[in-house]
Amino acid sequence: MIRVVPPPGHKGDDGIFRRYSGIGGQPMCINAYSDYAEEALAFIKFWFQPQNQRRWAEGGGGVCIRDIVQTEWFRNLTPYNRAYADSIAFQVDFWNVPFFFEMLTVVQEEIHAALAGNITPQTALDNMARRHKEIIERENYPAAFEKYGKPAKNVAQLIRRGLPIG
């Protein structure tokens, strides 16, 4: 039997208990300059129809429709679906910084080394912390990055910056 559980939380230096789980996958986006925006939107509408998401789930894919994820059918479909459904409440996105790829590469390299038995899990975590700190300091983050930048002139600029609309 395979069991999968959500990641444990931790109590920070401030005494507050926090639990995080990373959002996986790749978002579906429509380029503001695409000649095929209508076709792309039609595909997205098709893709997120509940019957299509159920079929995707049956093949092992992750879905995000609450009415599907919260069912016992979905939770029992794969060994990891229950943990996935339980972790949605504390999911956060990865770093929204220009050096995201470099940070992610560090995680992949260190986790792979630990899973391959080349280093201990603790060494992998220590290496990630050290390497991430080096990258963050080299990039002068957050001082070198404005939180919101200059005011956007239109909705397209907001979308390109990844800011919430409204």
Image (cartoon, rainbow, N blue to C red):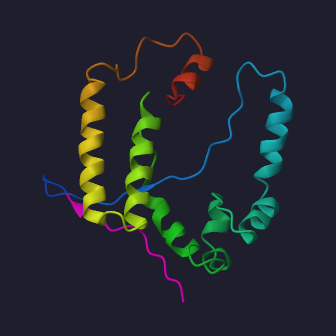
Q: Residue at x 46, y 64 (%)?
A: 87
Query: 31 and 130: which one is in front?
Result: 130
Q: Is residue 63 visible?
A: yes
Q: Position of residue 14 (x, y in %)?
A: 13, 52
User: For residue 65, which quarter of the picture?
Assistant: bottom right
Q: Residue at x 79, y 51 (%)?
A: 47
Q: Which residues are magenta?
A: 1-11
Q: Residue at x 44, y 59 (%)?
A: 112
Residue most extreme to the bottom:
1
Q: Is residue 8 magenta?
A: yes
Q: Position of residue 22 (x, y in %)?
A: 45, 54
Is 20 situated left or right of 125 in this image? right
User: For residue 45, which quarter of the picture?
Assistant: top right
Query: 2 and 156: which one is in front?
Result: 2
The image quadrant where one finds the N terminus is bottom right
User: For residue 74, which quarter of the picture?
Assistant: bottom right
Q: Residue at x 83, y 21 (%)?
A: 35
Q: Position of residue 124 (x, y in %)?
A: 31, 57
The prevailing secondary structure element of the residues shown in magenta is loop
Up-down relation of residue 25 to residue 67 (above or below):
above
Q: Is residue 144 magenta?
A: no
Q: Position of residue 29 (x, y in %)?
A: 68, 35
